Every structure is written in C-alpha cells, then in structure tokens.
Image (spheres, rainbow, N blue to C red):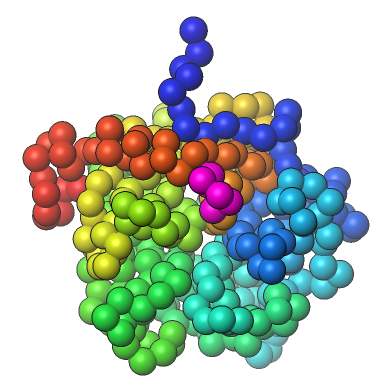
C-alpha cells in the first residue's frame, strides 16, 4: 500500500517546467523563488546556461500552472566588473514583499570566494536595485521575513560554521544592508537523520494562523550520495526566532523519476511557495534539472508539523536540540 497521509500532492504527470519550455538553449531550470503579484504567479527561475553559470529570469503565469511567459532577458546575471562576487552566477532567489510595491530578493552570489548572501529590491520584476553582498562567504539560502518584528527585520541564512551548516537568523533595525544579533534557529540534526548533514531555508516563510510555516531542506549522505528532502518547522508569529515545532519526519522527498534522476540525482529543493486560498503551492527544483509543483492544504501541513513535532517528542522546549 502506498503511503497516503502525505500532505503534498504533485501536480501533473511530470515536471511543470523544463529547459524545453525556454525559448533558448540552457542546461537546467531549477529552484525558483515564487510570489503572487497582481494576481499572477511570478517565478524567479534559476537558469543554468551551457557554460555552467546561473542567472535569474522571471516567468509569469495567470494560473500558476501553465501559459508561462518567460522574460526576454535575465533579472539578475553575472555583471563584471561591477559585481565581482557574482562572477560565477546568481543562484536560488527567494523573494518577499516588504512594502506596498517593494519586493526583496535574497540570492546566492557565487564567485571564486565562495557562495555569499546578496540582496536586491524590485518593484516590477523587470529591473532590480542591487544592495550587494550583505553576508560574506560561505553563506547561502537566505530569506527576509515580509514584515518587521518590534521594528526589526529578520533574515534567515545558512553560514558554514565549524564545518556545520545550520539555519541562523540575523536582525536589522535600520535597513536591509546591515545584519547583527545572530543566533541559531534550527541546527542540522547530525547522525543518520534525514536532515543530519546540512539544512537551509526552503521557501520564504509562510504566514499562517498558527505562526510562520517554514519549509526547509535537509541532506542525508547515503554512501557518498546526498539526498535532499524537505521538512517543516513552525515559528512564533510575533518573534520567528522562537521555534514552536519542528517535524521529525521529512514532508517531501525525491520519489518520481524526474526527482531521482537528472543532473544531480535525488534532489527536491524549494526556494518559493505561494498561499492560494487554503492551499500552499510549492514550486521546487527536481534533480537540479527541472521544476515541479506540489500542492498541500495549509491545515494539513500545520497538522503534520504538530503531529511529528520533534521538540515535543524529546521534551526540548528550548535549547540547541530542536
Ligand atoms: C545546494 C544548492 C542548490 C542545489 C542543491 C542540490 O547546495 O547549491 O542550488 O539545488 O545543493 O544540488
């Protein structure tokens, strides 16, 4: 009997978008940020070209499923000599709305110095204003919450510290360029856990009636081959540095042929989801090759993170073991 109590169901028989949907040749289309803008779904596609370098390009659709209109030029791409820390590409953009018409894009600026966290703002998704690198390498998987908390913006990110890769937070009172007061939000769980090796923010945090729902990725090394899966955490509505629950089991894993086989096998990796009615529509990279769409009821995701809450199971309300 197949497992039926999984909240996410895949839409369609195969990937939502592949390089065949692009009006030019590319190596891969993956890991999109996602937003609802004026009733349309906007995806920030990461497109890896046939040199191996990535840029970010916008795709728009009225229903979030088909009829994608691909922008005729990239929104973010390596631009030398002005942006030396992006010489190897702009990857994995996550987007949040931070003002009536202002959107903040957090992305990975990749260069010979390693991956760094960079920010840019946009009002129309046609052009950006770069803020530049705000956190130095080795750091990626960043996103900013869409509202300030007690006057402080909060950013989640994934620095490499002491050989470990946890999800950290940082705060900014004044602007989006200066981040301080760091702390660990979710640590990698170590050992044989599905998220034992390294973890990072997935989609932008989603506002729900129980708090901020965070979809994050975790990695397990299977005899030298990493498997990327997705899990859930629930963060306090008023102070998302407080973790209310973290599911012990993954909620989404590479199960289809196009997730298990591709340029990097066994990868599901999300950078963006949108809330439509009582559903979460999660766009995700499949095997670093194509893009899939999976939909879940928000209530089912909340029930899942509560039912599998690791913190409750081990009796740790606070502290490093989450
Ligand atoms: C991560 C990132 C993602 C990628 C994933 C799986 O480290 O680089 O862009 O999808 O690995 O290869």
Q: Is residue 63 above or below residue 88?
A: above
Residue 62, position in %: x, y? 77, 56
- Which residue lies at the image location 16% right of the left edge and 48% below the top edge? 321
| Residue 306, placed above or below residue 68 | above
Q: Position of residue 138 (x, y in %)?
A: 41, 68
Magenta segment includes 278: yes
- Give me the residue at 35% from left, 74% from top: 154
Residue at the image point whose x is 18% and y is 42% from the top: 311
Q: Main secondary structure of the magenta part?
A: strand
Front-most of residues 28 and 74: 74
Using residue 143 as the reference point, say whether residue 86 is left or right of it: right
Task: State whether residue 123 is above or below residue 9.
Answer: below
Q: Is residue 137 visible?
A: no
Q: Is residue 49 above or below residue 111?
A: above
The residue lying toward the viewer, choosing from 224 and 296, is 296
Q: Is residue 317 left or right of residue 272?
A: left
Q: Is residue 226 magenta?
A: no
* Image coordinates for residue 55, horizontal then vertical, percent: 70, 67
Q: Residue 47 at what x, y percent from top left? A: 72, 59
Q: Which residues are magenta?
A: 275-280
Which picture quadrant has residue 134? bottom left
Q: Residue at x 68, y 45 (%)?
A: 291
Numbered disc total = 0
Tell me if 89 is positioned left or right of 65 in this view: left
């Amino acid at each position: 009997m197949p497992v039926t109590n999984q909240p996410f169901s895949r839409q369609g028989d195969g990937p939502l978008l592949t390089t065949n949907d692009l009006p030019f040749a590319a190596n891969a289309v993956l890991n999109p940020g996602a937003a609802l803008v004026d009733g349309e779904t906007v995806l920030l596609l990461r497109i890896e070209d046939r040199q191996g370098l990535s840029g970010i390009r916008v795709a728009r659709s009225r229903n979030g499923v088909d009829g994608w209109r691909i922008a005729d030029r990239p929104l973010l791409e390596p631009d030398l000599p002005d942006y030396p820390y992006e010489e190897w590409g702009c990857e994995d953009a996550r987007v949040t709305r931070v003002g009536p018409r202002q959107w903040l894009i957090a992305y990975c600026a990749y260069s010979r110095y390693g991956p760094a966290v960079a920010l840019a703002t946009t009002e129309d998704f046609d052009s950006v204003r770069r803020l530049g690198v705000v956190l130095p390498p080795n750091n990626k998987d960043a996103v900013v919450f869409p509202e300030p908390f007690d006057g402080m913006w909060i950013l989640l990110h994934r620095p490499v510290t002491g050989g470990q890769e946890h999800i950290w937070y940082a705060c900014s009172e004044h602007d989006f360029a200066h981040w301080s007061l760091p702390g660990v939000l979710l640590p990698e769980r170590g050992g044989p856990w599905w998220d034992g090796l390294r973890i990072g923010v997935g989609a932008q945090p989603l506002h729900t009636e129980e708090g901020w729902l965070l979809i994050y990725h975790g990695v397990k090394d299977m005899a030298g081959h990493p498997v990327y899966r997705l899990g859930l955490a629930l963060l306090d509505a008023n102070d998302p540095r407080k973790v209310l629950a973290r599911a012990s089991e993954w909620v989404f894993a590479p199960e289809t042929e196009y997730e298990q086989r591709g340029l990097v096998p066994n990868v599901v990796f999300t950078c963006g989801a949108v809330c439509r009615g009582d559903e979460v529509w999660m766009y995700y990279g499949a095997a670093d090759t194509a893009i899939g769409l999976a939909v879940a009821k928000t209530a089912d995701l909340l029930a899942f993170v509560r039912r599998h809450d690791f913190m409750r199971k081990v009796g740790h309300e606070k502290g490093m073991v989450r």
